[in-house]
Amino acid sequence: MDAILDARGLFKSFGAVSAAKDIHAAIARDSVVGLIGTNGAGKTTFINMITGFLKPDAGTIHFEGRDITGLEPRTIARLGICRSFQIPQLYNSLTVYENMMVGLGVMLQNAGRGGFLAGGTPHVPGFDAPAEAVADTLLGRFGLDAYRDRRAQILPGGVRKLLDIAMTMVAKPRVLLLDEPTSGVSAEEKFGIMDMVMAAVRAEGATVLFVEHDMEVVSRFSERVLAFYDGRVIADAPPEVALADPDVKRYVVGGELHRKDRGEAGRA
Amino acid sequence: MSGGRVGLVAGIACAAAVVAGPFLPPWALFLVTIALGKGLVVLGLMLFLRAGLVSFGQALFYCLGAYAGGGIGRFFGISDIFLVLAAGGLVGGLVGWLLGFLLARYRAIFFGLLSLAMSMILYGVLVKNEALGSTDGFNVLHSTFLGWRPSNEWVRYATLLVALGTCAAAALLVERLLRTPLGRLLPALKDNEIRVEYMGASARRAIHVIYVVAAVLAGIGGALVGATVGHIDPEMAFWTMSGEFIFIAILAGTGSVLAPFLGAIVFGAIHTVAFDLSPNTWQMSLGIALLLVIVFLPEGVWSLFTRRRGA
């Protein structure tokens, strides 16, 4: 397998709590991987270690063959690993368009373009177009045109989610980590958001890892599932296999079944 | 406001001053020149405010610039106004670059108080330094202009013209800086620094850059005020001086690169009138003025212009 991202033997503990106990995961290039598990199972810790927010106690992470273990978030971001956030991290005082322009400016800056003395309209690396045009293209792709000039602070929840993800796309990420892209969004909106995100990602071309609690979303959008439980990966397989695994059913999907049982009991 | 508009407004203000200058009393020219010098310092402070930082220590660079500009006259006999301003900016920028390595690591109140501490260290050093006149400071040479030494009645006018040119250039350069990717990063730093880092930018580097820019501006401003007043002393580094710059910044608002200069002129006018009317309670008058601005014009006096255009 051509692994774009390869985590080997990751350990991380916070005091007495172990959030990662010997995690191994090799992510195939251009695949879409769903990360599932109950709260505290270690999904976000895994993402945080990949993106450099947390330094693993032990183990290594390789990206395209390069050891990126313990690098700073901005260095990892520059290499092409970007993330969105469970709670959208926007620039609230700026408009939707300006939020995009901040990120595009960073891309120009890191490419050594658009400095104080630069003239004209430099092209954003990877897009071959000026920042203004790229911002509008991406906003269109995420259906955000209508909100272009609204301040981020007053956006509805689903739109905040989309903008948060759209902001990661300015970097032309090769690996995109989406932390609960549909949390806090109504059930009707979930599939719409995922459809849009997946279409946009396919248009740009990236490997995607997404954390998700809704098993319907997981089985529809992922090609592979990593199931976390108690800081370990207990299943690593295509969704139909992983979701049928007895351990996964018991420790991860179990919560879901339990809730359904209660619902039926309530109706009876 | 676009770069073109800034240039236009600055140009009109300069033209008006050039024409009206010879007919205005020297004290008015003096007040405007001082205000422009302070406006330069506040222009730098505005960059911090945009990034969500407040420096309680810009007087450090203001005073350094004044001593650098006065110092080249005192020790080398150089009195050319352009060299004086350049010396102020250079020394301010150099010290700002060095201190920036430390200060750019801090945010919020720590940034503010650390910058205040730095300015008070300079104050302490100057007060103890006999060669630099201790608490009395020293007199600055009569300014010359590229070899020309104007008579006493024309030196104020000539200095004002240099000040206007310097401020217009500074405003246009800062306007351009704000339009670069680095400039656009400033409000993002204020809103969400973590996201900035996750986008692959260095918040520390951006803050270091604006720290140096603000230091250069404050250094030039200090040198200009020193040359205009003709005397400098350690009070220029005292914390109340830094407070005055913050006062002007709030009064002015951060809406435009020209706002600091307008704010400084308004501040100078209120100060002069209040002191004239009631020498013992002028601070109260200033306080009331600031209170009124905060309550009725929360975006500063500059919003008087933007508001009308929006309506």
Image: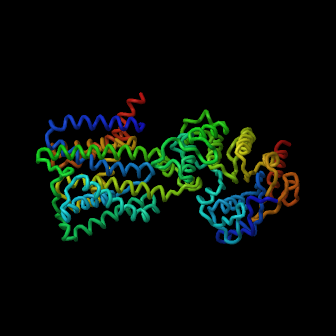
Foreground pick, A202 / A209: A202
| Residue drawn at (66%, 41%) of the image | A158
| Residue drawn at (24%, 56%) of the image | B84
Q: Disc count in the image?
A: 0
**Residue A241 percent location from the top left of the image:** 88, 55
- Residue B274 lies, with reference to residue B237, above or below; the image says above
| Residue drawn at (65%, 36%) of the image | A140
Foreground pick, A115 / A160: A115
**Residue A51 percent location from the top left of the image:** 65, 59
What residue occupies the far top of the structure in this picture?
A: B311
**Residue A181 percent location from the top left of the image:** 69, 48
- Residue B309 lies, with reference to residue B183, above or below; the image says above
**Residue A38 percent location from the top left of the image:** 75, 57
What residue occupies the far front of the structure in this picture?
A: B147
Q: For residue A13, which quarter of the picture?
A: bottom right
Q: How is the image coloured?
A: rainbow
What residue occupies the far left of the structure in this picture?
A: B152
Foreground pick, A96 / A233: A96
Quadrant holding the C terminus of chain A? top right
| Residue drawn at (38%, 46%) of the image | B173
Left/right placement of residue B175 relative to residue B161 reads right
Foreground pick, B1 / A46: B1
Q: For residue A72, which quarter of the picture?
A: bottom right
Left/right placement of residue A140 relative to residue B64 reads right
Quadrant holding the N terminus of chain A? bottom right
